Structures are given as C-alpha cells and as structure tokens.
Image: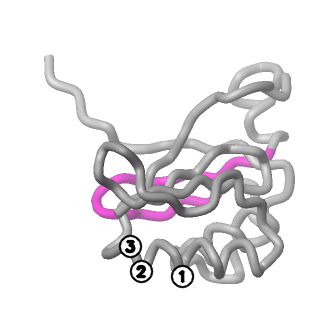
C-alpha cells in the first residue's frame, strides 16, 4: 500500500489572526475566508487546512489545547537574502521570532518563527 501526504491540518484559536500570519508568510488566502470555520489552501500539491477549535471539537469529539513542541512546518526560501527579508517582514508585523536567521552548521541559512497558535515554523535556504 502506498500513501502520500495530502494535507496538513492546523487548529487555530482565531481564524483571521492565523490567516493573516500565513498571508505575511507568503500564502495567497482571500480575505473572505477570515470568517469561515474551515479553510483549505493548496501549496505545491499539499493542502494546508485551518480549522477553528470548535471544528476540531466536532471532529475529534473533544479538544484539549496541546502544550509543548507539537509539530514543525518548514518552508524552503529561494535564497539566504529572501529568508532574512521574510523573517524581518514577519517580525515587523508583530509575529514572534523564535530564533533569528543564522548560518547552521549543516550548511543552510535557518530561522524559526511561531504562528499565532504557537506552532513552530522553520524557514531555510
């Protein structure tokens, strides 16, 4: 049996706030999605879904806010300069930078930010 990653789901406390963050990150998400309880976008063949806590409660039968490091999304940037610029743009828009861009020992330019729900987002080039 073969499987393929098709969708990553993210539970959000505030849909507009979450979508605004992912817009700054670079996703094209129409503003009219802000009030919906479930939003899906496609990115390079993978769907990213955003669900409100209420939707998660309905789907899973209950919802308990997770704690600690849960999942990390990692996005490839076109160059080190683009990564640095994106990190600056994100933090200037009031979102949390967890680790400023640095040249990692494994040869990549790397930075870590957090979305409004505390999910870690890695940027690398």
Does the magenta portion include 40?
Answer: yes
Colour style of the rendered protein structure: one colour
Q: Which mark is residue 85?
A: 1
Residue designated by label 2? 81
Which class describes the residues within 10 Å of circle 3: few (<14), some (14-19), or many (20+)?
Answer: some
Tell whether label 2 touches label 3 (CB within 8 Å): yes
Which class describes the residues within 10 Å of circle 1: few (<14), some (14-19), or many (20+)?
Answer: few
Is residue 76 visible in the rendered image? The answer is yes
| Residue for point 41% across, 63% down | 42
Element at label 3? helix
Placement of the N terminus among the 4 image quadrants: top left
The magenta region covers: 39-52
- Is the stretch drawn in magenta largely helix, strand or loop? strand
Q: Is residue 1 above or below residue 79?
A: above
Q: Which mark is residue 80?
A: 3
Which class describes the residues within 10 Å of circle 2: few (<14), some (14-19), or many (20+)?
Answer: few
Is residue 35 visible in the rendered image? The answer is no
Placement of the C terminus among the 4 image quadrants: bottom left
Q: In the visual, does 86 lie left or right of 10?
A: left
């Amino acid at each position: 049996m073969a499987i393929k990653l098709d969708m990553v789901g993210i539970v959000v406390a505030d849909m507009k706030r979450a979508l605004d963050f992912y817009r700054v990150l670079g996703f094209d998400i129409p503003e009219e999605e802000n009030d919906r309880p479930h939003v899906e976008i496609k990115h390079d063949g993978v769907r990213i879904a955003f669900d409100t806590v209420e939707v998660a409660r309905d789907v899973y039968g209950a919802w308990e806010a997770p704690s600690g490091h849960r999942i990390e999304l990692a996005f490839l940037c076109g160059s080190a300069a683009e990564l640095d610029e994106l990190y600056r743009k994100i933090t200037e828009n009031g979102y949390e930078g967890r680790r400023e861009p640095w040249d990692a020992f494994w040869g990549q330019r790397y930075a870590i930010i957090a979305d409004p729900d505390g999910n870690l987002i890695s940027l690398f080039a």
